[in-house]
Structures are given as structure tokens and as C-alpha cells.
Image (cartoon, helix red, strand yellow):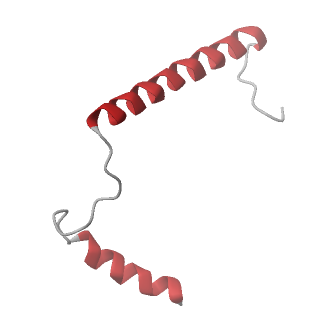
Amino acid sequence: MLGLISLPINLILKFVPDKIAFKMGNELDEEIRASNEDYLNLRKISGALRNDMMSKSGKLVGIGD
């Protein structure tokens, strides 16, 4: 029952302009850029690991296999 209350509240909040809503955090542009670079590097590493695992076994092996 409590969860049903959140649906109309969420619908109302969808129409609140971003100017009214508060902004969480005050990251600098440099911090955002560094974070994006870290994310892209992690994607590269995970892709290389996945390719390495597939080439060794011929299939994608996950944790617990």
C-alpha cells in the first residue's frame, strides 16, 4: 500500500523543473572529466579481460562456472 503512494508522487515530481530541484554535489568540471576517463578505462579493461577469457576457453566463462 505504501508503495502505491510513491507512484503519484513520482508522477508529480516528473513535471518539476530542474531549476526548482536542488543539485546534489558540486563537482568541478575537472572531476567529472577524470571520472569519465576512469569509467572508459574500466570498460577497456573489462573488454580485454572478456576477450582473453573467450579466446582461452572458446566461450564466455563467468564467476561460479
Q: Residue at x 18, y 69 (%)?
A: 20
Q: Nearest the camera: 39 or 59?
A: 39
User: In the drawing, does residue 65 fall left or right of residue 52?
Assistant: right
Q: Nearest the camera: 21 or 51?
A: 21
Q: Which residue lies furthest to the right in this view?
A: 65
Q: Residue at x 35, y 53 (%)?
A: 25
Residue 63 picture quarter: top right
User: In the drawing, does residue 43 fall left or right of residue 35?
Assistant: right
Q: Residue furthest bottom?
A: 1
Does residue 65 lie above or below 22 as drawn? Answer: above
Q: Residue at x 68, y 11 (%)?
A: 52
Q: Nearest the camera: 47 or 21?
A: 21
Q: Which residue is drawn at 75% across and 30% down?
A: 62
Does residue 35 lie above or below 50 as drawn? Answer: below
Does residue 3 lie above or below 42 as drawn? Answer: below
The C terminus sits in image quarter: top right
Q: x, y (%) of residue 46?
A: 59, 23
Q: x, y (%) of residue 54?
A: 69, 15
Q: x, y (%) of residue 27?
A: 33, 44
Residue 48 picture quarter: top right
User: In the drawing, does residue 51 fall left or right of residue 39?
Assistant: right
Residue 19 picture quarter: bottom left
Numbered marks: total? 0
